[in-house]
Image: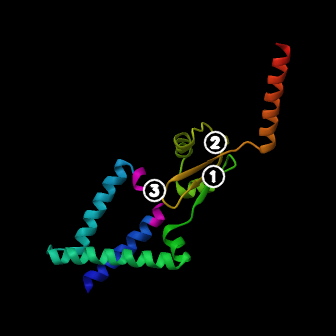
Amino acid sequence: MELILRTAGIYIFLLVLFRLLGKRSLSELSAFDFILFLIISEAIQNALVDEDRSVVMGLTVILTFLMLDLGMSILKRKYVFFERLTEGVPLVLVDRGKVIESHMKMARVTYSDILQTARESQGLERLDQVKYAVLETTGAISIIPMQPDLEELLDRKLEAALARLLNRRSS
């Protein structure tokens, strides 16, 4: 029973710790982050099983983690508040080309992170081309490009059509 309580305590501690540390998906981990996770896993393993290295002990730890994870997924599905508490909510980093500094500081995201995602996902070069940049709950940044105003778009198309008409008449 002590092992199950120890495992549950570490699970909750890690959940809170990684929730506080911020949102980064596994694909965005640096080499340092990856090494840190490996070290943490070794420390957790030692804290969980101490000197007992039996197969039963290891299976008990794995089973406890899986049951806790299953319980969390059920709670998240049933209660929106619990999902928001554990997963967070999307965070707007750029609003109509304007950076929201406080959100970027809170999420520890840089201009370079946003611009890199804008280039990779939408082919955009500048922040003023970004309508919204949203840090998703997964840690990924979604970019919604600025759409030209409909009236402005119609004006440009009319001007182009008139220019073609005038070129045809003068030829």
Q: Which residues are magenta?
A: 19-28
Instruction: Judge whether 31 appears above or below 88 on screen.
Output: above
Residue found 53% across the figure and 79% down from its top: 79
Q: Main secondary structure of the magenta part?
A: helix
Residue 118 falls in image quadrant:
top right
Q: CA distance from mark 3 to mark 1?
A: 19 Å
| Three-letter code, disc 3 | Arg
Residue on which disc 2 sits: 127
Which comes before the other along the chain, label 3 or label 1?
3
Q: CA distance from mark 2 to mark 1?
A: 13 Å
Which comes before the other along the chain, label 3 or label 2?
3
Check whether the beta carbons of the residues at disc 3 and disc 2 lie within 8 A of each other: no
- Residue 101 is tagged as 1
Instruction: Judge whether 59 appears above or below 148 on screen.
Output: below
Q: Residue furthest bottom?
A: 1
Residue 51 falls in image quadrant:
bottom left
Which comes before the other along the chain, label 2 or label 1?
1
Residue 46 falls in image quadrant:
bottom left
* Left or right side of 167 for 139: left
Label 1 secondary element = helix
Place of residue 68 in the rendered image (x, y in percent of width and height, measured from the top left): 36, 77
* Left or right side of 137 for 95: right
* Left or right side of 60 for 81: right
In depth, the one of 113 and 20 nearer the eye is 113
Within-10-Å neighbours for mark 2: few <14, some 14–19, many 20+: many
| Three-letter code, disc 1 | Glu
* Left or right side of 88 for 50: left
Q: CA distance from mark 3 to mark 2?
A: 21 Å
Residue on which disc 3 sits: 24
Quadrant where the image shows the N terminus: bottom left
Place of residue 134 in the rendered image (x, y in percent of width and height, measured from the top left): 59, 54
